[in-house]
Image (cartoon, rainbow, N blue to C red):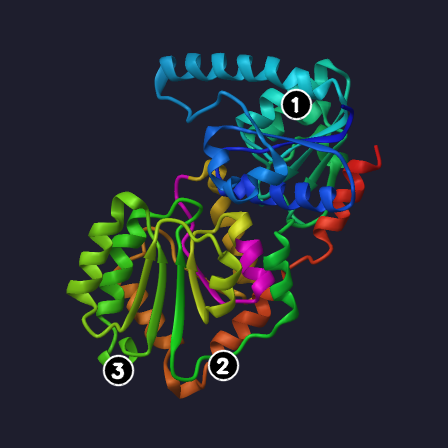
Amino acid sequence: MTTDVVIVAGGTGGHVYPAIALALHLLKDGKKIVFLTDRRGLFYLKPHLDVLHPVVLPLGRKGVGLSGLIKLAIQVFRSFFISLKYVKKTKAVIGFSGFPTLATLLAGLVMCRTLYVHEQNAVLGKVNRLLSPFLKKIFTSTKKIARVPKAAVDKIEFVGMPVRDDIAALAQGSYQTPTTCITLLIVGGSQGSQSFSDVIPKAVGMLPAALQKRLHIIHQVRSDDHTHAAELYKQQARDLPHLTLVPFIEDMAGALESAHLVISRSGASSIAEIAAAGRPVILIPYPFATDDHQRANALEVTARGGGWLISQTDFTPLNLTALLGDLLAEKDGGKKLLVAAQGVKGGYEKEAIKRLAQKVILV
């Protein structure tokens, strides 16, 4: 069967979610697609397996040292040959970063297909820089992007970040400042964050009892940290009436809709979904992200007045308590939250999915 486009994404939810959004949009328009991912990416595709029927490439996490590099090279080599089967039957290939993109786009290069990538972050990733000489276009989520090779500058085209339809629908609504109950949504990236599980319960426990009693916390926590986080909340935040701890938030649209304030890592996909919902956000960039791209992403948000940035070094219970106490205080009637909600929403590109779909189909 000949397909219109091969879509490849794997690794983290930040790569996979925008690829899912594009795939579902194209299928709705009657296009034929093949979706390639890796073992980690398959986790985020679970709700869409019956629709997307993804092909799983034999790629896992990058190992350590020379043995890790050799293992990775073998996995990429095997994935390259699997990709050839699907690439030879398509017109174009678009990758969403990571090693699955490397393997599949190399297959596309050998087959002389039209090649694209979509860069989610404010810094062009290593794989995308490596492939840049062979790409027709490099689509970006941000209007400014760093680390672009000089020879590839003319290939850059801003389209925005595709988000899933259920989250995009939230853009039609408006932000309501909290009155009695305050819903705090905590997402540590696609797989949670260990430091969040330690710092946030302690910070909440340091808030005045009257404020704690108004909180409803939805906290995405890694399975390994669930018991630890639950115990900390129990010990530290004794006046907290409502707590939901989950390893993965399947209904992110519902969680965002209910939230008055979000605490999050600053992966580009997470930021785009928060922007679509128009929710004020406290961002803690993951300090070990390649090229420090999460900090660059967070600075884009704070420059619009859409939230607050706390570096990992400054992410302490005392500092977070001070910020939460200031933002959630009744004295300003939620004005700071409302202004930030408007600022973060200013970064949402509602036409992103349509722009990207049109570009990859018009080969």
**Residue 280 colored magenta?**
yes
Find the distance from the CA under tag 2 to the CA under tag 1. 48 Å
Q: Amino acid at mark 1?
A: Leu
Write the residue at 77% across / 38% down: 31
Residue located beneath label 1 in the image: 105
Instruction: Say left or right for 34 vs 339.
Output: right
Q: Position of residue 236 (x, y in %)?
A: 18, 65
Could you tell me if residue 304 is visible in this image? Answer: no
Find the distance from the CA under tag 1 to the CA under tag 3. 56 Å
In the image, which residues are magenta? Answer: 271-288
Residue 187: quarter of image: bottom left
Callout 1 secondary element: helix
Could you tell me if residue 80 is visible in this image? Answer: yes
98 w.r.t. 48: above or below: above
Callout 2 secondary element: helix
For the residues bearing labels 2 and 1, Cβ distance under 8 angstroms? no
| Of pointers 1 and 3, the one earlier in the residue sequence | 1
Residue 87: quarter of image: top right
Residue 63: quarter of image: top left
Residue located beneath label 2 in the image: 335
**Residue 285 colored magenta?**
yes
Instruction: Say left or right for 63 vs 1.
Output: left
